[in-house]
Image: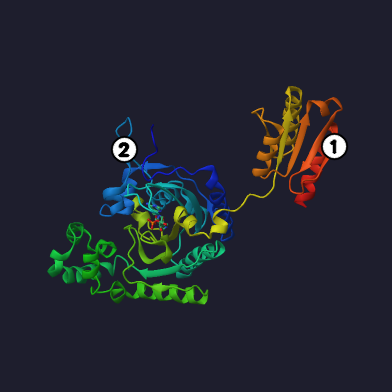
Amino acid sequence: MIKGVAGVPDILPSEIRNWHYLEAKARQLLENYGYVEIRTPIFEKTELFVRGIGPDTDIVKKEMYTFSDPRHESLTLRPEATAPIMRAFLQHKMYTKGSLVKVYYLGPMFRHERPQAGRFRQFHQIGAEAIGLENPSLDAEVIAMVDHLFADLGIQPIKLLINSVGCKVCRPEFRKRFTVYLEPKVAKLCPDCQERLKRNPLRILDCKNEACQEVIAKAPKLTAVLCHDCGSHFRQVQGALSFLKVDFTINERLIRGLDYYNRTAFEFVNPALGAQNALAGGGRYDGLAEEIEGVSTPAIGFAMGMERTLASLSPALRDPSPSFEGTFIATLGDEAFRSGMLISQELRKKGEKVVLDFEGRSLKSQLRWANKEKFRYCVIIGDEELKKRLVILKDMASAEQSEVPISQVIDRILSFAREKRT
Ligand code: HAM
């Protein structure tokens, strides 16, 4: 038997309500903050991710699903959506639409990571990008929006970590100090970090290896060397968050796994989730547009992991019981089945949900099934009743039933449905 790929799960019908619930909540909230959906392709030119995310990041070095198309062009399944959105923004000159463009997205991302609880090779993100302004109040609004989303979803406990990762002006100074501090301790670092020390020492801050964590515990802090502008920007972000009553903790080691960030970096973690506890992450990426096309465009955004967020939902929301809805048509005999088909089509054309039995089951088992599936009404058509041009209409919630002329059954169900909606 051919099974699915490890770390690439199916989303089964039994789980789909939770996904729809999360998607609907997120869409509504992001639209309330003025974001409009954008859909970029599942794959892009590899170069976009190498330049955008950074050649020394784990994502680019080890985790991309890269393939050659028949014309030998190197393409990659998107590991994230920020670089593709910036590509689309520049390609379609979306900056002509105004000085601030706000877009949101949701969909699958692909990273070749070691699968474990909360870590998949195909996973889903909901995210948003606000492109065009450097204003620190915008950073605060994006962070407050994610906080609002988690509050709306009732997710507890949740912790917001923020940091400033500086800019092109102050980061080289930090890099110098950090390297000077690490060089005498290089033997204690893991092989990956020994390599990182030569190429991109800041990535060491992101290493999960315990020995490396110990070495960096006493390292100089990035926030201590922020330039005047970055320091002021970070203070204003904190001020605006406090003003908006969003609780946060400054984590000076928060560097994030993508190289495009500058200034604000943030993560929402659920401490109850174990190792893969980051539910959402984001930050400012004022240099990404320049990396892609050479035009400077400041921007900030976030992405939330849908699988991890769903795992954090309270069990009541995670498994919302379906409400009574729709009509089931139970039939007995060929003539009855044909009438059932006609009634179903008629009702569906009027916008109703209707399901008909195709298995020729006994009436009892059809009704048992309709009850289990929580249908609101059942129309029972038997060949005997049909001779009298009658059907039985059963309200599945109250179990009341009555005989109705077949010519009236459609109007009866439509008027019940209308009543229920008002
Ligand atoms: P990221 O931190 O790489 O950021 O991913 C965001 C979220 O996606 C994580 O916090 C996590 O919940 C989820 N996630 C990431 N990898 C996996 C995985 N292998 N399995 C399950 N969930 C995962 C970004 O992707 C940036 N593009 C966010 C951003 C938007 N920054 C600015 N704008």
Comparing 36 with 11, the one in front is 11
Image height of 383 relative to 212, above or below: above
Comparing 195 with 403, the one in front is 403
Instruction: List x then y, in percent, for residue 158.
Output: 46, 67
Mark 1 belongs to which amino acid?
Glu
Image height of 402 relative to 397, above or below: above
Q: Residue at x 17, y 60 (%)?
A: 194
Mark 1 Cα shell of 10 Å, populated few (<14), some (14-19), many (≥20):
some
Residue, disc 1: 403
User: Is residue 34 found left or right of 163 in the rendered image?
Assistant: right
Instruction: List x then y, in percent, for residue 334.
Output: 73, 22
Instruction: List x then y, in percent, for residue 287.
Output: 35, 59
Quadrant of the image occupied by residue 190: bottom left
Asked if residue 128 shows in the view, the reply is no
Query: Looking at the image, do the residues carrying marks 2 and 1 touch, with CB atoms under 8 Å apart?
Result: no
Mark 2 Cα shell of 10 Å, populated few (<14), some (14-19), many (≥20):
some
Image height of 63 relative to 187, above or below: above
The Cα–Cα distance between marks 2 and 1, rounded to whole angstroms, is 64 Å
User: Is residue 61 found left or right of 380 in the rendered image?
Assistant: left
Mark 2 belongs to which amino acid?
Phe
Residue, disc 2: 67
Asked if residue 181 shows in the view, the reply is yes
The secondary element bearing badge 2 is classed as strand
Q: Is mark 2 within 8 Å of ligand 1?
A: no
| Quadrant where ligand 1 appears | bottom left
